[in-house]
């Protein structure tokens, strides 16, 4: 009765008889092993989530950062996981730490902040290479957090503020340029059609009159001046000139008497 063991659905069993591994892997269920000569090792086949200890590293552009990551892995070969490595959990954690520092040292800060997907794939490839001989497969690696020094944070904040100000100035200048083009086109249309200018004036009058407590001063219409100009006939060239008034005293040839 002491030799009965239960292997769960997500486990596999490796039996060592007198220290020698048996080729047959025990599957889930109730099994019996010799309590004297056999020793059973249960291997969990579920995905293991392991957090990598935050690592201080220096990027390729000489910026000191602290990176925190998480590794997802599982056992695909129970025999290798028992025989080829003493503690595969600790082995995967140590490989993840060294690989994380190595990958960060080959990357720039901009890539670390904006191109994490490529770094995650690179980390997965680097970590999965040595674990293949241990019967462990790395399913996924994620960089959780990147901590920057305070001086670098302030520099990045000033850079972002300058970039936003530059974009605002460019947008404002572009708006002024487009507005000047529209105004030039409108002025050309109104110069060609004088009635359009009068319609615009009337529209402005309606807009001002719709507001309360508004005082509107109307200029003298130009069309009225043109009407009087056309109504008054021009002087004829053969008309008699006006009579010149004679001086009040004295003669026409001599000086005036005092």
Image: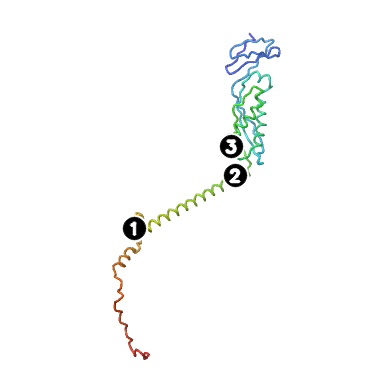
Residue 125 visible in rendering: yes
**Of discs 1 and 3, which sits in the foreground?**
1
**Of discs 1 and 2, which sits in the foreground?**
1
- In the picture of the structure, the residue carrying the numbered disc 2 is 156
Between residues 31 and 140, which one lies in front from this camera angle? 140
Give the mark count.
3
Q: Check whether the beta carbons of the residues at disc 1 and disc 2 lie within 8 A of each other.
A: no
- In the picture of the structure, the residue carrying the numbered disc 1 is 195
Residue 78 placement, left or right of 187 = right
Q: Seen from this angle, which residue lies furthest top? A: 1
- Secondary-structure class at tag 3: loop
- Secondary-structure class at tag 1: helix
The picture places residue 96, in percent across and down from the top left corner, at: 65, 30
Residue at 56 percent across and 47 percent down: it is 163
Q: Within 10 angstroms of label 1, few (less than 14), some, or many (20 or more) residues?
A: few
Q: Earlier in the sequence, mark 3 or mark 2?
A: 3
Residue 213 visible in rendering: no
On screen, residue 12 above or below 227: above
Q: Earlier in the sequence, mark 1 or mark 2?
A: 2
Residue 104 placement, left or right of 251 = right
Between residues 203 and 188, which one lies in front from this camera angle? 188
């Amino acid at each position: 009765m002491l030799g009965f063991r239960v292997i769960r659905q997500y486990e596999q069993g490796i039996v060592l008889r007198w220290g020698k591994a048996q080729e047959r892997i025990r599957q889930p269920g109730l099994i019996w092993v010799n309590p004297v000569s056999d020793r059973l090792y249960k291997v969990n086949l579920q995905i293991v989530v392991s957090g990598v200890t935050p690592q201080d590293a220096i990027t390729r552009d000489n910026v000191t950062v602290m990176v925190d990551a998480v590794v997802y892995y599982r056992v695909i070969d129970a025999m290798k996981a028992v025989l080829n490595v003493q503690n595969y959990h600790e082995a995967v954690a140590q490989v993840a730490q060294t690989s994380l520092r190595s990958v960060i040292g080959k990357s720039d800060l901009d890539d670390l902040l904006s191109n994490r997907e490529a770094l995650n794939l690179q980390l997965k490839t680097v970590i999965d290479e040595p674990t293949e001989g241990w019967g462990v497969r790395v399913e996924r690696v994620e960089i959780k957090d990147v901590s920057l020094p305070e001086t670098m944070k302030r520099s990045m904040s000033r850079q972002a503020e300058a970039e936003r100000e530059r974009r605002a100035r460019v947008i404002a200048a572009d708006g002024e340029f487009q507005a000047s083009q529209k105004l030039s086109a409108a002025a050309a249309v109104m110069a060609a059609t004088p009635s359009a200018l009068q319609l615009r004036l009337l529209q402005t009058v309606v807009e001002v009159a719709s507001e309360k407590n508004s005082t509107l001063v109307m200029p003298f219409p130009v069309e009225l001046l043109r009407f009087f100009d056309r109504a008054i006939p021009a002087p004829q060239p053969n008309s008699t000139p006006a009579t010149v008034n004679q001086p009040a005293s004295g003669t026409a040839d001599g000086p005036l008497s005092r």
